[in-house]
Amino acid sequence: MSLPCLTFHEKLRAAWRSSDSALCVGLDPRLERLPDSCLGSAEPLFTFCREIVDATAGLVCAFKPQVACFSATGAQRELQSLIEYIHHEHRDVPVILDAKRGDIGATAELYAQEAFDFFHADAVTVNPYLGWDAIEPFARRLERGVVILCHTSNADGAWLQEHPPAAPVYLRVADMAARQDQGNLALVVGATFPEQLAAVRTRAGDLPLLVPGIGAQGGDVDAVFANGLAEDGTGLIVNASRSIIFASDGEDWAHAAGQAARALRDDMRRAKANALAQAG
Amino acid sequence: MSLPCLTFHEKLRAAWRSSDSALCVGLDPRLERLPDSCLGSAEPLFTFCREIVDATAGLVCAFKPQVACFSATGAQRELQSLIEYIHHEHRDVPVILDAKRGDIGATAELYAQEAFDFFHADAVTVNPYLGWDAIEPFARRLERGVVILCHTSNADGAWLQEHPPAAPVYLRVADMAARQDQGNLALVVGATFPEQLAAVRTRAGDLPLLVPGIGAQGGDVDAVFANGLAEDGTGLIVNASRSIIFASDGEDWAHAAGQAARALRDDMRRAKANALAQAG
């Protein structure tokens, strides 16, 4: 396993250019939804995701595997194999490990080791509740990306993240990321909160924004691009998981995932063109 | 592995009674600090911690293994073995998995599965940044404990957790826990912030408080008991990790850990008696 030669932002920008896609496919496999042929494999989660990866790699700017889908049953080695496979077979596509880690000092260093040295991810999602000194052990790895939760897509997130209304936590987090960035930070902002997405874009300059919540969670693609594009027309990593990977429950899962990814990528291209036309 | 017959609060109260100790030993092993005889073992982290556990089990109200110390190198099975060992050999001592997980809906369910069904922990630490709907999938497991980060012990935590001063996030979290508790919630409040500890105790009634930050991090034992005891004189789970488990770097690590744990337990008993005398 060779170390990455590019920084996360560089790898991401190259992936945006070569794919002309803002789509990130979330690799969130669930054992109970896998087709029979995968369940017969010695590594069912890996087998399922590998086929999804091969069917969608040319259509995406990133993959985002969810560590809990593997660690819930002690299947970390399958995730390790999957990320190694992506690096080997689709080396231009960055891998964002969705782990939402957050702990202090020495423990944060261990979580960085887990994400970057054990799983070999290009970037990892982290939780800002413990402040910058809990994020810095990740961010000091300047060749890797750190994607900080800012405004999440779920209904109850606003309870803490929009407190207090006059100076909400999520904008405090956006300001911190803009201030601390050395070319390797990004922010998570849910598609289900388009006004907040616009506010974060204003505060965070051209930082990449990872946007979950379209598809199964109901976020609107047009609103994401109208509110979230950076000035240069890039800046968005728009994640879809279930609507892609479970597009079919049958043995044609990979083909169906490829079709769903292509349709969503094309819809995002249209939404982006509209947003740029309206901005221009 | 049998399921626990008691709830987390019941198991904890029984452990407080039988041990007359508020000490929780944090099991945070670091490969680079293990004595040679452990490094020669096939399961060095497990071997090291097992000896610590046997030397301290009679002196504690809980053990708190740190998942990152194991997952950083893919050694989850050693942590699984360690927790199984504690349940088997020291069945009255609850195990709090320090994982600080936080994610939405279906993913939170997977993390609950990781903590409770894969690792068989009695309780798990979680992060409140995503709000109650990200905690509820843990808390609905009424026979298990959910320990919510409230005010952490590190210097930068206050940046978010005390924002804004008039209605700080950490008290909002304390209020939520008091409101949602069905007999299985607890809160993390760092020993390094004793005034905030008193404020949380006032807001959260008799909820158990897990207090890290004494020992290596500099928190004061007297201040913890003066500010953190519940009305009935219980309520505190005071964690020490490095000052116990690395009391000696040599082959006498377990004996040294036992001595350090005994001294700290006795110091806590003294501090508790003082606090109760002053309150009375």
Image: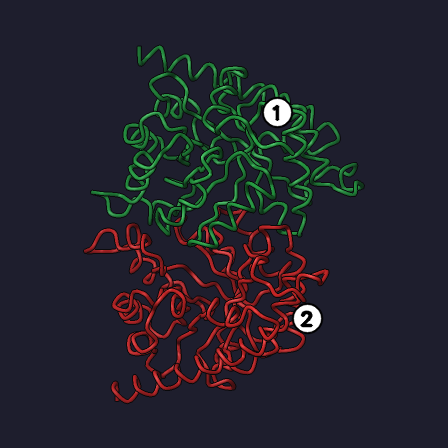
Chain colours: A red, B green
> Which quarter of the figure has residue B173?
top left
Residue drawn at point x = 50 percent, y = 19 percent: B14
Residue drawn at point x = 42 percent, y = 53 percent: B105
Residue at numbered disc 1: B91
Q: Is residue B270 visible?
A: yes
Dot 1: few (<14), some (14–19), or many (≥20) neighbours within 10 Å?
Answer: some
Q: State which chain disc 1 sits on.
A: B
Which amino acid is tagged 2? Answer: Ser
SS type, badge 2:
loop
Horizontal arrangement in the rendering, residue B204 relative to residue A250 (left or right): left
Q: Is residue A143 visible?
A: no
* 2 or 1: mark nearer the eye: 1
Front residue of A107/A133: it is A107
Q: In this view, does A174 lie above or below B46?
A: below
Residue drawn at point x = 70 percent, y = 68 percent: A1
Which amino acid is tagged 1? Answer: Arg
Residue B148, given in percent of the width and then of the height, sits at 41, 40
Residue at numbered disc 2: A2
Residue A15, given in percent of the width and then of the height, sits at 51, 81
